[in-house]
Amino acid sequence: MQTQTKEARIVLAIEAIHTTKKLSVRRIAQVYEVSESTIRNRMKGCLPKAEKRNAQHILTESEEETFVRYVFDLDSRGFSPRLNVVRSMADLLYTTRRATPVGKQWPYNFIRCRPEFKTRFSRVYDFQRALCKNPAILNAWFRLMVNIRTKYTI
């Protein structure tokens, strides 16, 4: 017999309960080596721990996705999103539902937990590089600015 994960055994046990009316929940729990209370809870609609959202999350999933799109939109327009901007946007989203603002360390923790964000440290600007005039780079930047102006009708 193949070794199966506990989650797979739970799903099989629930399917067996729905298809086989002769066996009790207790007997199916013994056959599939799963806790009887786990099977009953899953049949009532409880989610597994891996799919539950942690209670410490301040924003909902849709708010977080909106927030990530906002930060990437700022970045695409050439504005580097600073931590105080991130905090103020989170405060705006969070205070629409509740009265208290997010904590002081929230932006740091949010950026650390989201793999989409990758922070970079500020680097010293090379003066020789600043003197270099590359028309291809300048033209790309001006095209970006024209696109932004047309997109937002500025």
Image (cartoon, rainbow, N blue to C red):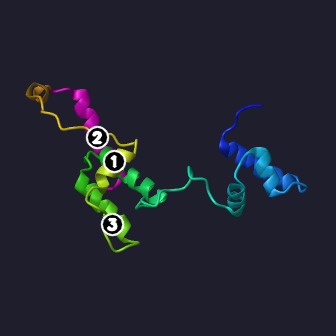
Location of residue 18 (image quadrant)? bottom right
User: Is the residue under label 2 in contact with that under label 1 (CB below 8 Å)?
Assistant: yes
Q: Which mark is residue 92?
A: 3
Q: Secondary structure at mark 1?
A: helix
Q: Secondary structure at mark 3?
A: helix
Question: Where residue 26 sits in the image (x, y, percent)?
Answer: 79, 56
Q: Residues within 10 Å of mark 1 (few under 14, many from 20)?
A: some
Give amino acid for label 2.
Thr
Q: Residues within 10 Å of mark 3 (few under 14, many from 20)?
A: few
Q: Is residue 79 left or right of residue 19?
A: left
Give amino acid for label 1.
Ile
Question: Where residue 2 sits in the image (x, y, percent)?
Answer: 74, 31
Residue sitting at x 69%, y 37%: 4
Residue sitting at x 33%, y 56%: 153
Q: Which mark is residue 111?
A: 1
Q: Is residue 115 left or right of residue 133?
A: right
Q: Is residue 77 magenta?
A: no
What range is drawn magenta here? 133-154
Q: Distance between the Cα atoms at labels 1 and 2?
A: 8 Å
Location of residue 25 (image quadrant)? bottom right
Location of residue 130 (image quadrant)? top left
Give amino acid for label 3.
Leu
